[in-house]
Image (cartoon, rainbow, N blue to C red):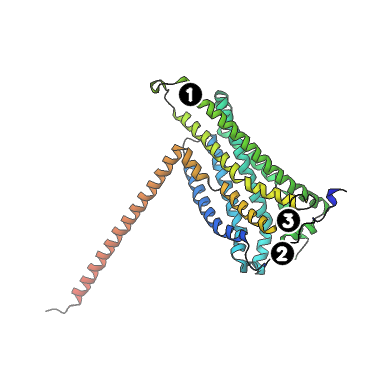
Amino acid sequence: MNNDSITSCNWPVEPATNETLPGPDYYVKAILFPIILAINTVGNFLILVVLGTDKNKTSVHVYLISVACFDLSVVWLELYTYLPLVLPDQVKDETYLRNFINFYGAQTFWQNTSMQASNWTLIVFGLERLYATIRPLQFRTAMSIRRAIYLELVVVMLAVLSNLKYPISWYYALQHSPDLALQDLAAEAQYLTPGLFGWENVQNKADIGIQIANWIAIFTIDCCLLTVLHRHLETRKTLFHAPERAPAVSRSSQSSGSALRLVIACSALYVFTMALPITCNILLIAKEPPHCSYYITTKTLDLLSGLGTMSLLVNYSAGIFLYCLTWKRFRERIKSWVRLWFTLAAEHEQRSSSEMTVMENVSRSSVINETVNAMPPV
């Protein structure tokens, strides 16, 4: 019997649940997402300000600025699906639901594109650091800001092409179903042509495959970078035992070492935070037909999916902490920006206080003059 012909699995019947009561995934998302959104917004804004105002830009700045922009898109577009969760009454409004459905295809497309572009940029960044560590002389002649921009444009174009299915299939279904806005989002499939329906099935499998491939690639690159860094430190200890024999560390080598530590930390964060979402997707595939190879209750799967979504968003939000931990120059620039902001705020407050004092003195003088003028002559 062909497994593709299996339409249902012979799993135990689960007890009925009260759909009016929120599930466990609701509390996970409702509590954690605002925190993640705040960290993502403040952190990536600081990254863009610090790196964007740096006069000594390199290819590292191109990758990190791109990642910060993609990370902002990923988390802020998740807000579009978070609001109906915490404000269910708004979903009942037909106008709001129509706008939600009209924007759903574009939101899904760009959120997935941003995730892919961020992940692939991290892979390119890791490969570049690996090449810079193993072949430093060749790297200096081969890489430049212009080539980094070209590579980033290729990454974005590939990410766009890999997610074209989402807007095409969704808006095709929306065009051929005027009442789709009043139905469940899963009703999209029944309005697709056989070709688009087959593309959707291939896309769903490809997304899981790409996710697993990204995880393996980043994990492998991280292990290689750690090995190279360990050998570099061992060689340095062997060549320079005495402190007086240690060579002076140049600013460029310090920057290169910080970039290497940063990409190792970012890769490690990706490996840990993406393990749960990948596991949830594998469990979901194993539970559904035609596989039907592993059973997990819907309640448990929903809880794991909620945790997996939050874990995924942490990967795109915690970069600011890694930057501060591994990059000394970044920390110094953050401190200088904070000092500048507090200085300007203090000066603004002092100026406002002085202006208020002057205005109060002028007002008091005017009152005194009016009182003197109003007094009858003696």
Q: Quadrant of residue 161?
A: top right
Q: Nearer the viewer, mark 1 or mark 2?
A: 2
Crowding near the residue tagged with mark 1, few <14, some 14–19, many ≥20 C-alpha atoms within 10 Å: few
Q: Residue 79, position in %: x, y?
A: 59, 57
Q: Which mark is residue 90?
A: none
Q: Residue 24, position in %: x, y?
A: 61, 60
Residue 151 visible in the current orientation: no
Q: Residue furthest front?
A: 12
Compared with residue 52, is residue 128 higher up or lower down, i.e. above or below?
A: above
Residue position marked by numbered label 2 in the rendering: 15
Question: Which corner quadrant holds the C terminus?
Answer: bottom left
Q: Which mark is residue 236?
A: 1
Type of residue at label 3?
Trp
Crowding near the residue tagged with mark 3, few <14, some 14–19, many ≥20 C-alpha atoms within 10 Å: many
In terms of sequence position, does the residue under pointer 1 or pointer 3 come before the other?
Answer: 3
Residue 109 visible in the current orientation: yes
In terms of sequence position, does the residue under pointer 3 or pointer 2 come before the other?
Answer: 2
Q: Nearer the viewer, residue 249 or 54?
A: 249
Q: Residue 179, position in %: x, y?
A: 75, 66
Type of residue at label 2?
Pro
Residue position marked by numbered label 3 in the rendering: 170
Q: CA distance from mark 3 to mark 2?
A: 33 Å
Type of residue at label 1?
Arg
In terms of sequence position, does the residue under pointer 1 or pointer 2 come before the other?
Answer: 2
